[in-house]
Amino acid sequence: MAKYGRAQIINALLIGARHAEEQGDSVESKNLLEQAISIARYKNEPSNAAYAGALIRLADSCAERTLYSEAEQFYEDAIAILESVLSCDHASVAIAYRNLSEILKSQGRQAEANNMIRHCQPILDRFFQFAKSVN
């Protein structure tokens, strides 16, 4: 891991897991995902947007496989990093909150999901209004 950061390793494992899944090798896909999860759980990574992005992709992969508690933790870790690196009202943070709210809904935690949506929707609305104005 000395030559490459954990973000790059996690991303490579996720690409491998997706490829294995597409090839019908669910055992290999699961093994690669578990390796990525293991690497991400080691907490001494510098807080940067690349690592947060890797955590989000990992959370997405966990969610696709209905590993909701893992997905929830990785989204929360990514959000904490993004809020410190970007800001609380950045669109990337709001998108991560929206994705986390979907995980909460999947677990029957509708009230928590709704609170999250109320938090992030105004940020997303501002972002989409800005995007429309530049086009």
Image: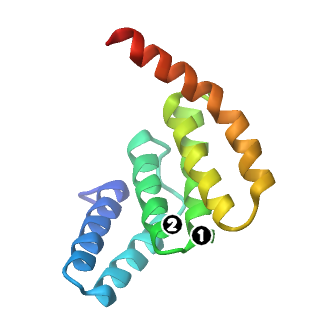
Q: Position of residue 101 (x, y in %)?
A: 64, 51
The picture quadrant where one finds residue 43 is bottom right
* In the foreground, 133 or 11: 133
Residue at which label 1 appears: 68
Judging from the image, what secondary structure is the residue with disc 1 in? helix
Residue that appears at 39% across and 77% down = 35
* In the foreground, 71 or 130: 130
Name, please, the residue furthest toward the right. 111
Judging from the image, what secondary structure is the residue with disc 2 in? helix
Quadrant in the picture for the C terminus: top left
Residue that appears at 45% across and 68% down = 64
Query: Of marks 2 and 1, which one's residue comes earlier in the chain?
Result: 2
Q: Position of residue 73 (x, y in %)?
A: 61, 61
Query: In the image, is 8 to the left or to the right of 123?
Result: left
Residue at which label 2 appears: 63
Q: Amino acid at mark 1?
A: Tyr
**Residue 76 visible at all:** no
Quadrant in the picture for the N terminus: bottom left
Q: Amino acid at mark 2?
A: Ala
**Residue 31 visible at all:** yes
Residue 99 drawn above or below residue 22: above
Labels 2 and 1 touching (C-beta < 8 A) = yes
